[in-house]
Image: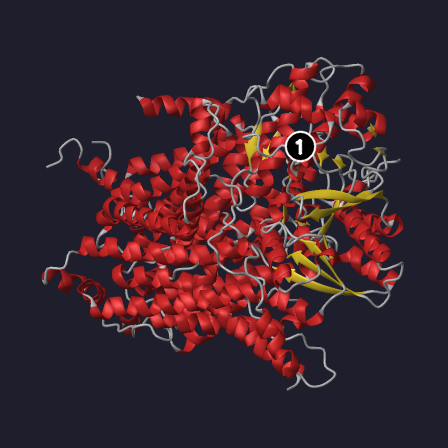
């Protein structure tokens, strides 16, 4: 009997996925399990909590309530498809899969289904070219902007000349980690520094060879593109060989609270970031009041204010702003995914908008346009303070070398267009 | 001495140490395979589970906190006490013994006399089960393993060796990780005590008897079930040691279970049935993969260690299909 | 009563040696085919196709391939993920290098390329046996993934090493790429699954299959009675890899549409396919399908029940999924160590005697 009931529930849920009526649906493709759970959990919490807060404080967006159905991907592409297909039926407005692999695979599907993808600081970098990737948005920054900004910072710290210096890239040997290589090669040619590539295979628990190599060669700077356990081991090994921490730079996925195993040992470590740090913003009072204290928090509330929580919340804020833009543009409160895409394309993330959302100066200002889905690419630099056990923003949001990056984006997106017979939109 | 030569020595020494770390994981496999012919895929997850339990007990985490909170709407996380390390380790060993008893009673007992591949599959089921169970019990965030192990390179060695290189060469002294040195010591103690245990105690002899022949052991009155519980408990203890060592390196998190993949080539090379084989295999694999990465890696793009360990083991196997120290496979028609 | 040979007289040798000697079985077989080809496409939604049916068919093909190697020839292999990756990358290279080539040719060629690679990596099996061989095949898994990740030629020098399948059509119907309808993609996979199952069935009944089984049961004895172990083992590796290559090819081109070798074809894939055939039943075509169904459907079903039906938090549900799947594997093994196919066989035997069991 019980089995039969279970089977009935299962069959009905399998067959019918009834769209939630009259809600703005912002699905969360999260990963709270598996090897990357420590990174996925706070991000998903931030994304969900922001929308919960909007519902409680403002009554949703433009008077329409939001909902955040969650689906566990485990950072696995096949599960990502399953999640995408099941949430698509629920009237999803935008997807934010937080996985470069899932993003690549959703780009053609979502474009065909007219659903936008918001991939802030990850995914396909050349998605910034709106003429070819009509449904991909990766503003305010991408991996190549991050790499270029780090090189600029290194140059700044070296007094403006890095010719002849040796910079090592320690990277996760996967699609994500390999992304910055073309940019760094182009920059190496331009600025005259030597680039050493040091790959680390998944999962990256054993990096002795790599760090012995670094210890022998003593590169002037290290750029770290890691994720998951690789970050912790890399920072630990760097501390072990007493590599000067302030000469080491991480991309934003290597610059979270998870990554310092021993707070003091990584004192001075720097990382690129596309949003501000800490929890000294008005929005946190609202989240505390409407979400955490009301017992509606997505997680256990312990992640509020952490880097990845902030990043998830920032993504949610961007999506909510775009939804409001779409509502204004189309004069329609219950927007569709197609309208949401227009909203993202015409987003205007000004200081005034961020201040109104309770996050003044939280990220760089940017606007979307038909051709530009990547914003200005402005990236800041944060530094780990071992005494206070906190990140601190030390370099403001500055533009990277957009000339070099622009050419690379064009080349990569043109190759994609040629392979897939896409006619660029007329922008 | 030229710096290049010193670098080579450094790579070899570090390779040996890394090999010891692999051996720690491989030992658990060997113990179980020897006594029961089971290729225990869950060994890596057992290391993760043991490490999670140790940290959980030590920091006074409430087990199943997330589940309890989800069901009862409460907000409990910590008992608010800290358990001393030694006591926490003892309690964790207790948990692993309990685990061994449960495994024997509910799984192995029902699968006596099945083919090896079925038993292997059962341990995969067990691995799945424990992955979910460990996460529900202790949560999936990264935890710091703090049992007072040292970390960082040995300064003394670095300074002592700094002058060894020839004049004018860039050399910064020999680098050895203190944690690795401790691990090596622990491994030596572990292997010696395991050997003494199996050679000179009654239980140890019974263990070897079972490993030689189940039927014969049964017929002289050795209880197979007790032996299996003991073996799985010891394997659980070895998993705890491996979990502590690896956890101190990378934090206690899901990826810890993947260290099993590093132990497989060691097993292959050393043979599934030999404890010294696990150690020597580990040393060969450790040195081999580090040397290959050092000498050939840069030429072909690096990150070769994962596959080279297997290829190295494969090359040995072509000449000795039962591993270096494995029992000779005798086949009769 | 209705399930027995008596009364069903066979008058030719062909009829006597057919796959389904019992009339009821034959009817059931045609019925399943009819449902698969005619009924399911009528009710196929995007979700059912992309999350359930297509992955099921793709994994079933991979399981068939591995079953030939493990179940019929007794060579334990954990290199499935690597071989699927070879199939997927071969497809990508063929699709982008020869845009005019039709998809069936592309997929068959990818299968052949994988068969060649598989036979190469099967060479150690001549010397190494049992679990040692299983671990040795992991060498091919890690090496192939590393190679496909390292050499930019395999992914046409794209920045991140991701490959995406361009749009291709057959008979005017789009079958790959985002605009493919679920029905077209499903039928395309189904044709391959049925054809390959038919091929596997007939291969395993023939001379080649018998030599495989002789090797499995006792290789020394097989050698003495005149089976060439070199030919038997390498042909098993080649045929198995052919199937797995096709599975990888469909996995990439029809199912996922984009893939990255380290993520999509990692070691977990190798283990997953091995689970399928052990749960389904070693040495059984039917078992490969049931095992694939179990491993594909079970998580989806559990997820929908726990999250959709009971409203649990997704992370708790995901952890429980692991616990339940792990627990079920153990329970199945205790109840019936030879897999679901053996359960079906026992049921059939009982049915044959029913209603007079003695």
Do we see residue C292 in this rendering?
no
Which residue lies at the image location 63% right of the left edge and 44% below the top edge?
A257
Which quadrant, please, contains the N terminus of chain A? top left
Residue in the image at 88% along x and 36% along y: A426
- Identify which residue is drawn at 26% across, 61% down: B35
Location of residue A355 with respect to A119 vertically, above or below: above
In terms of depth relative to the viewer, which is nearer, A276 or B261? A276
Q: Secondary structure at mark 1?
A: loop
Q: Where's residue B108, x and y in %? A: 25, 50
Q: How far across and how far down the image is residue B195, in percent?
A: 29, 70
Which residue is under mark 1?
A95
Q: In this picture, is C63 found above or below B267? A: above
Where residue C256 sits, quadrant-wise, is top right
Q: Residue C344: x and y, percent?
A: 29, 40
Quadrant of the rendered structure where residue C1 is? Answer: top left
Tell me which chain the residue with mark 1 is part of: A
The x and y percentages for residue A241 are 63, 65
* Quarter of the image where the C terminus of chain A is located: top right
**Total numbered labels:** 1
């Amino acid at each position: 009997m019980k089995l039969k009931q279970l089977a009935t529930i299962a069959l009905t849920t399998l067959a019918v996925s009834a769209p939630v009526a009259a809600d703005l649906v912002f699905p969360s493709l999260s990963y709270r399990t598996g090897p990357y759970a420590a990174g996925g959990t706070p991000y998903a919490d931030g994304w969900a909590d922001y929308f919960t807060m909007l519902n409680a404080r403002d009554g949703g967006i433009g008077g329409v309530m939001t909902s955040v159905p969650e689906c566990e991907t485990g950072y696995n592409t096949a599960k990502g498809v399953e999640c995408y297909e099941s949430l698509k039926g629920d009237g999803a407005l935008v997807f934010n899969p937080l996985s470069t692999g899932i993003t690549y695979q959703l780009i053609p599907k979502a474009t065909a289904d007219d659903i936008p993808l918001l991939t802030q600081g990850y995914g396909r970098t050349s998605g910034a070219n709106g003429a070819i990737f009509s449904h991909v948005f990766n503003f305010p920054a991408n991996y190549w902007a991050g790499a270029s900004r780090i090189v600029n910072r290194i140059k700044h710290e070296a007094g403006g000349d890095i010719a002849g210096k040796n910079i090592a890239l320690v990277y996760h040997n996967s699609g994500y980690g390999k992304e910055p290589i073309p940019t760094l090669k182009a920059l190496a040619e331009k600025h005259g520094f030597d680039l050493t590539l040091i790959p680390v295979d998944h999962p990256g628990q054993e990096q002795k060879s790599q760090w012995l190599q670094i210890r022998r060669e003593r590169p002037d700077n290290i750029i770290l593109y890691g994720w998951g356990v690789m970050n912790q081991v890399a920072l630990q090994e760097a501390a072990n060989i007493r590599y000067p921490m302030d000469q080491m730079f991480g991309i934003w996925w290597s610059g979270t609270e998870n990554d310092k195993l021993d707070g003091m040992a990584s004192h001075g470590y720097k990382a690129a970031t596309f949003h501000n740090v800490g929890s000294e913003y008005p929005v946190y009072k609202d989240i505390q009041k409407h979400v955490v204290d009301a017992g509606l928090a997505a997680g256990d509330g312990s992640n509020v204010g952490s880097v990845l929580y902030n990043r998830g919340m920032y993504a949610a804020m961007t999506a909510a702003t775009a939804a409001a833009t779409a509502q204004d543009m189309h004069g329609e409160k219950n927007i569709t995914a197609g309208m949401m895409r227009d909203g993202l394309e015409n987003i205007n993330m000004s200081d005034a908008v961020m201040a109104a959302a309770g996050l003044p100066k939280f990220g760089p200002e940017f606007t979307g346009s038909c051709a530009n889905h990547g914003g200005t690419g402005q990236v800041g630099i944060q530094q780990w303070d071992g005494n206070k056990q906190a990140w601190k923003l030390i370099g403001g949001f500055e533009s990277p070398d957009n000339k070099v990056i622009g050419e690379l984006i064009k080349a990569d997106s043109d190759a994609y267009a040629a392979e897939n017979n896409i006619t660029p939109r007329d922008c | 001495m030229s710096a290049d030569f010193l670098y080579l020595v450094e790579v070899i020494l570090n390779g040996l140490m890394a090999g010891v770390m692999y051996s720690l994981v491989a030992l658990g496999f060997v113990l179980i395979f020897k006594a029961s012919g089971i290729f225990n895929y869950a060994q890596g997850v057992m290391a993760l589970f043991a490490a999670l339990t140790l940290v959980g007990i030590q920091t006074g985490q409430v087990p199943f906190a997330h589940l309890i909170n989800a069901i009862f709407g409460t907000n409990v996380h910590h008992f608010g006490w800290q358990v001393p390390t030694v006591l926490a380790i003892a309690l964790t060993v207790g948990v692993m013994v309990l685990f061994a008893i449960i495994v024997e009673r509910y799984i192995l007992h029902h699968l006596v006399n099945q083919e090896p591949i079925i038993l292997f599959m059962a341990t995969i089921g067990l691995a799945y089960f424990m992955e979910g169970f460990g996460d529900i019990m202790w949560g999936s965030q990264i935890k710091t393993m703090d049992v007072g192990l040292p970390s960082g390179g040995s300064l003394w060695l670095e300074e002592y060796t700094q002058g060894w290189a020839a004049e004018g060469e860039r050399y910064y002294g020999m680098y050895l990780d203190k944690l690795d040195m401790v691990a090596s010591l622990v491994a030596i103690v572990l292997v010696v005590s395991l050997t003494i245990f199996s050679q000179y105690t009654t239980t140890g002899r019974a263990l070897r008897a079972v490993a030689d022949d189940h039927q014969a052991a049964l017929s002289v009155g050795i209880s197979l079930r007790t032996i299996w519980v003991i073996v799985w408990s010891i394997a659980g203890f070895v998993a705890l040691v491996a979990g502590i060592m690896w956890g101190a390196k990378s934090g206690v998190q899901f990826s810890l279970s993947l260290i099993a993949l590093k132990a497989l080539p060691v097993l292959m090379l050393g043979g599934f049935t030999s404890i010294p084989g696990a150690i020597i295999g580990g040393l060969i694999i450790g040195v081999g993969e580090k040397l290959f990465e050092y000498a050939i890696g840069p030429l072909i793009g690096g990150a070769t260690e994962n596959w080279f360990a297997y290829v190295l083991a494969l090359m040995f196997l072509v000449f000795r299909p039962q591993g270096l120290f494995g029992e000779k496979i005798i086949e009769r028609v | 009563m209705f399930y027995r040979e008596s009364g069903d007289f066979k008058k030719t040798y062909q009829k006597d040696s057919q796959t389904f000697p019992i009339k009821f079985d034959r009817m059931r077989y045609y019925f399943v085919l009819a449902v698969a080809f005619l009924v399911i496409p009528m009710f196929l939604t995007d979700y059912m196709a992309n999350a359930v049916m297509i992955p099921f068919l793709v994994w079933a093909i991979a399981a068939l391939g591995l079953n030939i190697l493990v179940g019929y020839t007794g060579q334990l292999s954990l290199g499935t993920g690597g071989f699927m990756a070879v199939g997927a990358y071969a497809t990508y290279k063929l699709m982008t290098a020869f845009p005019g080539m039709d998809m069936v040719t592309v997929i068959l060629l990818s299968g052949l390329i994988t068969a060649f690679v598989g036979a190469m990596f099967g060479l150690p099996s001549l010397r190494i046996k049992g679990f040692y061989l299983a671990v040795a095949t992991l060498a091919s898994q890690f090496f192939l993934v590393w190679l496909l990740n390292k050499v930019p030629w395999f992914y046409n020098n794209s920045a991140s090493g991701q490959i995406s399948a361009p749009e291709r059509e057959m008979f005017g119907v789009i079958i790959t790429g985002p605009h493919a309808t679920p029905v077209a993609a499903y039928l395309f996979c189904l044709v391959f699954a049925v054809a390959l199952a038919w091929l596997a069935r007939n291969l395993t009944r023939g001379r080649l299959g018998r030599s495989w089984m002789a090797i499995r049961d006792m290789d020394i004895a097989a050698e003495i009675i005149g089976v060439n172990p070199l030919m038997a083992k390498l042909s098993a590796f080649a045929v198995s890899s052919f199937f797995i290559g096709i599975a990888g090819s469909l996995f990439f081109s029809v199912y996922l549409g984009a893939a990255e070798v380290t993520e999509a074809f990692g070691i977990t894939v190798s283990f997953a396919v091995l689970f399928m055939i052990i749960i389904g039943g070693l040495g059984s075509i039917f078992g490969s399908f049931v095992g694939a169904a179990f491993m594909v459907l079970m998580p989806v079903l559990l997820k929908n029940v726990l999250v959709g039906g009971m409203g649990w938090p997704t992370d708790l549900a995901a952890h429980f999924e692991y616990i339940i799947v792990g627990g079920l594997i153990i329970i199945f093994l205790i109840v019936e160590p030879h897999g679901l196919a053996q359960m079906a066989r026992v049921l059939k035997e009982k049915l044959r005697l029913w209603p007079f069991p003695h």
